Amino acid sequence: MGHTISEKILAKHAHKTSVVAGEVVVCDVDFAMVTDTRASNTIKMMNKLDRDALKFTKNTALVLDHYSPPPHPEAAEIHQKMRAFADQANTHLYDIGDGICHQVLPEGGHLTSGDLVVGTDTHSVTYGAFNAFGTGIEGSDVAAVMASGKLWFRVPESVLIHLQGELQPGVWAKDITLYLLGKYKAEGLNYKAIEYIGSAVSKMDIDDRMTLCNHAAELGAKAAILEADQKTFTWLEAHGAKTPSPVYADHDAVYAFKDQLNVSLLAPQVARKHHVDDVVGTDQIDRQAIQFALIGTCTNGRLDDIRQAAHILQGKKLAKGVRMIVTPASRQIYLAALREGLIEILTSAGASFEAAGCGTCVGITNHLVPGNHETVISSANRNFKGRLSNDEADIWLGSAATVAASALTGFITDPRTVAGGTWRNV
């Protein structure tokens, strides 16, 4: 009997020849991450341990990205503790404005193909874009990892999703993830490891691959993993990662189920207010007005996302009454967008830029608070009621291209119907 990518990675890190779904194993962890929303409890637990015994701290990163910048003194105090701990324990620190954890970890060369990576955020599944097993854990679990370098896992069942064809201009990985949320529903793949394969995946650039894996968190996935290829290796080498150890599934691997989707037929998708899995094509929306647009977050705050918006808004202005905020996923992405002239294009169109971080997405910093009965179109990963600090506002989800097209027209719009909306990165 063959094995899936997840089974092979967990078996290797458990020092076993093989593992099967449902088995509980103790694995060596390659890298761990703690965000500022979980750091307080983690550091409190770490301070109770023998600091000299904490051999894994050099393979851990503390990331100040949710309370960024800190909205109250309590958050600022957490940041003070994180900086002090990082100095004392020789731990990597990403400070305010450096970026979102799921972007700075790969950018910093902290992971590679075949690795086992954990972080205190459900969207740690993003690391599967690089053929790593990435998954979310709690702060207390990170304390255990920092003390021992190990953590227990229940081996997940795997699901194989074959993405055939090629995304058409104006359609992005975000549209695939939204379509799958509509099909399987939120948490419909709880504790499953998704393996995405097929020609559509091979043709995606790394930015889109990260989106594909990131949004698996809304499906409830334990992990989402892609096969490694030359694009993977080139990106990892450019970012100083260690030598990849790519892992591929066996031809006779056992899956909970298999599915396939011809993405060539896919149109831009949107998730309607309050539910990530209430998904329809943009062509089914009849002039839904919007007042706020958000591009960014760990799902769609990468350079290609900003490029999508810039191609649509170049030389134009946002629709009357529409506000737009852009939050790059990292400082490096912001600088790259600056060098390409994208910042000037979007700022001239009427958009505002926030420092790289998560605070706008989750409503912690209150930098994007819509008014009562206003509608937001967002490239974020979640649109729960009250997500942006106002229960009386509505949030819809779409690709960065859909968000930009909607900001241009003032109502939810298929990006393919506006100039620049069919741009693609090739």
Image (tube, helix red, strand yellow):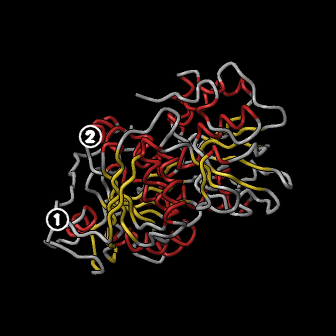
Please identify the quarter of the rendering in which residue 206 is found.
top left
Q: Residue furthest right?
A: 372
Q: Residue at x 21, y 55 (%)?
A: 247
Q: Is residue 84 left or right of residue 371?
A: left
Secondary element type, mark 2: helix
Q: Please state the horizontal and vertical placement of residue 419, each as a whole percent of the image.
A: 62, 24
Q: Is residue 319 left or right of residue 90?
A: right
Counting residues from the start of the chain, the first of labels 1 and 2 encountered is 2
Which residue type does callout 1 highlight? Asp
Q: Which residue is mark 1?
A: 252
Q: Residue at x 42, y 76 (%)?
A: 49
- Of the 4 image quadrants, the one containing the C terminus is top left
Q: Is residue 239 left or right of residue 84?
A: left
Q: Please state the horizontal and vertical placement of residue 53, each as a whole percent of the image.
A: 34, 71
Q: Which residue is mark 2?
A: 233
Q: Please state the horizontal and vertical placement of residue 182, each as a whole percent of the image.
A: 54, 60
How would you rate the neighbour count of disc 2 (Cα within 10 Å): few for under 14, some for 14-19, many for 20 or more?
some
Between 47 and 75, the one nearer to me in the picture: 75
Between 343 and 178, the one nearer to me in the picture: 178
How would you rate the neighbour count of disc 1 (Cα within 10 Å): few for under 14, some for 14-19, many for 20 or more?
few
Q: Please state the horizontal and vertical placement of residue 414, each as a whole percent of the image.
A: 63, 38
Q: Is residue 56 above or below residue 296?
A: below
**Is residue 150 visible in this depiction of the protein?**
yes
**Is residue 357 visible in this depiction of the protein?**
no
Which residue type does callout 2 highlight? Phe
Between 28 and 7, the one nearer to me in the picture: 7
